[in-house]
Amino acid sequence: MEPEEDHLESVGGPPSDLPKSAPEWVPDKSSSSCMLCSTNFSLTNRRHHCRGCGKLLCKKCCSRFLLLPREIYPHDDPQRLCTDCYKKISIISFEKKLEAGGIAEGPTLLLIHDACYNRAAWHIQMDILSKQFRVIALDLPGHGSRLDEDLTLKSALEAVQDAITNHVPEKKALVMGMGFGGYVAMVYAGQYPEHCTGLILCGAAFNSPGEQTFYDMRTALYKMLPGQALSGVMSSMEVDGTKEPNLMVSLRYLMRAGFHYDQWPKVQKILKTTDFVMHLRSYDGKVLFVNGERDKRSDEKALLASANDSVLQVILGGDHLMYWDEKQYPELHKFVVQFATTLDLLPSFDDHEGTESLESLLGDLSV
């Protein structure tokens, strides 16, 4: 079986229309109002320069942040952009709301990303799993190519439903979610079991009332810090402050795709107001839980008990970064493919197949 022609092209490399050099900034004194919305500048509505076009803009019109290509922009931290430049410079394509690749005639694996990321977070797993599956990674509302859409549980389910009913010929997929994406997957499987061949929940086992303090603190932090700090400092916190080369390579890639920390309050609202155990109990199919040993797992036992047919796999020494940490993703890959064999979606599996290095998967991040 041959790979699909569109295999990951818009995620795996730099945009083709990048500017050749950094733009000249419009002088501060040349305009007393935003060059996009015409709002007057003041002590509370300061001037900002978009690092993509150099225009003089208000904060609202220049509120996106990306890590820019080193060869063009001499910065090592995320920079402020207007929405148009953000869409041009991000390594994801905004012309489509999902990526599809892998084996055209293989079983479909649908990937739902974690909160505040986008479909590019699955890049490594898409490359690895495309050897066994037809892989689809979508953007949730408020994230990636859907950044202008309102995030609610209903809109998130509609995004999943659209991907399966309009992009999967058999209208059925093995649904895999990471973190918040795992919780969305639980609800989707409970409401639309006929569209799920199975369910894989990764790092989605910590939504008990006792974790709400953690969520509240995270919300307060996101509101307090500016976007640039959130995109840079918070991404470092995601790896517990480590400077391991493979994690920093992954972080640089994710910062080139963009983060969506402004969506966290809406994510928290969904997590607080949804009975995920009830939805998981409504699904009769097989469920695979994959958790890192060091990840938050306060709900693990309750979720396992609520699923009708479930299995738990724990990545020893692992954490919440299992899908893009070079030390963990081979184990995740193995668990996913082994689970697919129990569903009769795949034949037997060679543990050593498809574990290329992180650098070879991500390519050159200097552009």
Image (tube, grey):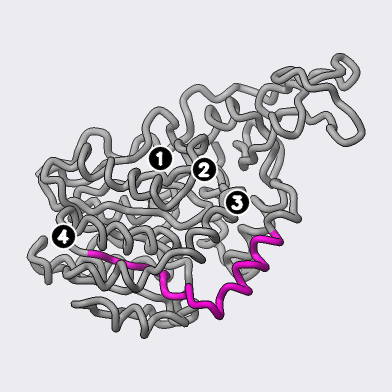
Residue at 44% from the left image edge and 61% from the top image edge: 180
In the rendering, which numbered label is found on residue 257?
2
Local secondary structure at mark 1: loop
Name the element at disc 4.
strand
Mark 2 / mark 1, whichever is N-terminal: 1
Label whose residue precedes the other's in the sequence (4 or 3)? 4
Frontmost of labels 4 and 1 is 4
Please tell me which residue lies in front, 72 or 145.
145
Q: Mark 1 points at which residue?
A: 11
Horizontal placement of 342 versus 163: left or right?
A: left
Question: Quick one: label 4, few (<14), some, or many (20+) residues within 10 Å?
Answer: many
Q: What stretch is highlighted in magenta?
A: 199-221
Q: Say which mark, if any, is on residue 331.
A: none
Q: Give the labeled residue for mark 4.
A: 197
Q: Distance between the residues labelled 2 and 4?
A: 30 Å
- Secondary structure category for the residue under label 3: helix
